[in-house]
Amino acid sequence: MEHRDFLAITDLSREEIQTIFSRARLHQESGPQAVLPGRSVVLLFEKASTRTRVSFEVGVARMGGHPVVLTPAGSQIARGEPLQDTARVLSGYCDCIVMRTFGHERVQEMAHWADVPVINALTDLLHPCQVLADCFTLQGRFGSLKGKRVAWIGDGNNMANSWINAASLLDFELALACPAGYEPDAGVMDAARAGGAKIILVRDPAEAVQGALAVNTDVWASMGQEEEARLRMEAFRDYAVTKSLMDRAAGEAVFMHCLPAHRGEEVTEEVLESGRSIIWEQAKNRLYVQEAVMAFLLQQREEMHI
Ligand code: CP
Ligand code: NVA
């Protein structure tokens, strides 16, 4: 059956992002809309999660649907059942699949074989649900992001790549400061620049935060990179977000982090707990934006079959 997936922010148009934000705002202000009665959503997590797992599970329940959480260990996946089989079996039971995994090609494979919308709940390459919610948070505070500067400090990881995708659709300038060897994905960056996005890549964090209204960072070793942690700690030594770095950003600048955070590594306790930090608001908004994404994809599927 024809359907849309949400594997990357670039799967959406500018207009669709604003439609999703309008619904998210409605859920934030007036409570959830029961648009999933009788519907089931499988949440397949091949990596650890607190926020994504709970916000999706609660979100499905708040909209009148039934969430089913699946992990490789508790299913046949760890025993080697191929994704192409799992995808088609799950499609017979549920209306949407939310998947967190390692290689991006795994979520693409799931989407290829599934007959229902697939949502990327984080891969090694992208974290679209988090960054979409972060853009909703910023837009709620500052209005249109067009022409404004957002800074990214540290690892050119899945979060950085999704911020690059978002810059191409929300028309903000993205300034990234990354150490040599830890730049964002070249393909993601080239595609965004080819589409007219303003992506600035520098080495010096002070240069990236100049005039920025949001300063973002993330852990130095992502899930799956635990063995590189020591090496990375050395490479990122000059990339911590400190108060003095925040003071170089715009006067109204906020600090953002997808969490979990490592206090005293990528960000100081002082910044994380300061009045400029909007980390709890970011985490909370995951719920509303993901509810809106699920509602949007299920509505699209219905319209494709009228
Ligand atoms: N930010 C985020 O995705 O957190 P979890 O890993 O806890 O889901
Ligand atoms: N970059 C981090 C994000 C966690 C939400 C990771 O992939 O582990």
Image: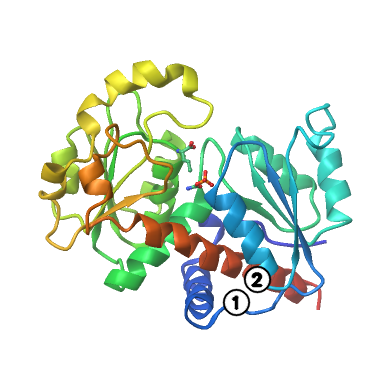
Residue 223 shows which numbered tag? none
Q: Quadrant of residue 240?
A: top left
Ligand 1: does it lie within 8 Å of the C-beta at label 2?
no
Q: Is residue 174 left or right of residue 126?
A: left
Disc 2: which residue: 62
Residue 57 image offset from top left, x and y in percent:
66, 58
Disc 1: which residue: 32
Can the viewer see residue 144? no
What residue lies at 11% left-to-right and 50% top-to-bottom?
247
Question: Which element type, helix, strand or loop, lies under badge 2?
Answer: helix
Q: Nearer the viewer, residue 77 or 188?
A: 77
Residue 194 image offset from top left, x and y in percent:
39, 48
The amino acid marked with disc number 2 is: Arg
Can the viewer see residue 122? yes
First in residue order: circle 1 vs circle 2: 1
Q: CA distance from mark 1 to mark 2?
A: 6 Å
The crowd level at tag 2 (other Cα within 10 Å; few <14, some 14-19, many 20+) is some
Residue 306 image offset from top left, x and y in percent:
81, 79
Q: Nearer the viewer, residue 91 or 218?
A: 218
What residue lies at 38% left-to-right and 65% top-to-bottom?
137
What residue lies at 30% left-to-right and 66% top-to-bottom?
145
Q: Is residue 131 left or right of residue 77?
A: left
Question: Which element type, helix, strand or loop, lies under badge 1?
Answer: loop
| Quarter the N terminus occupies | bottom right
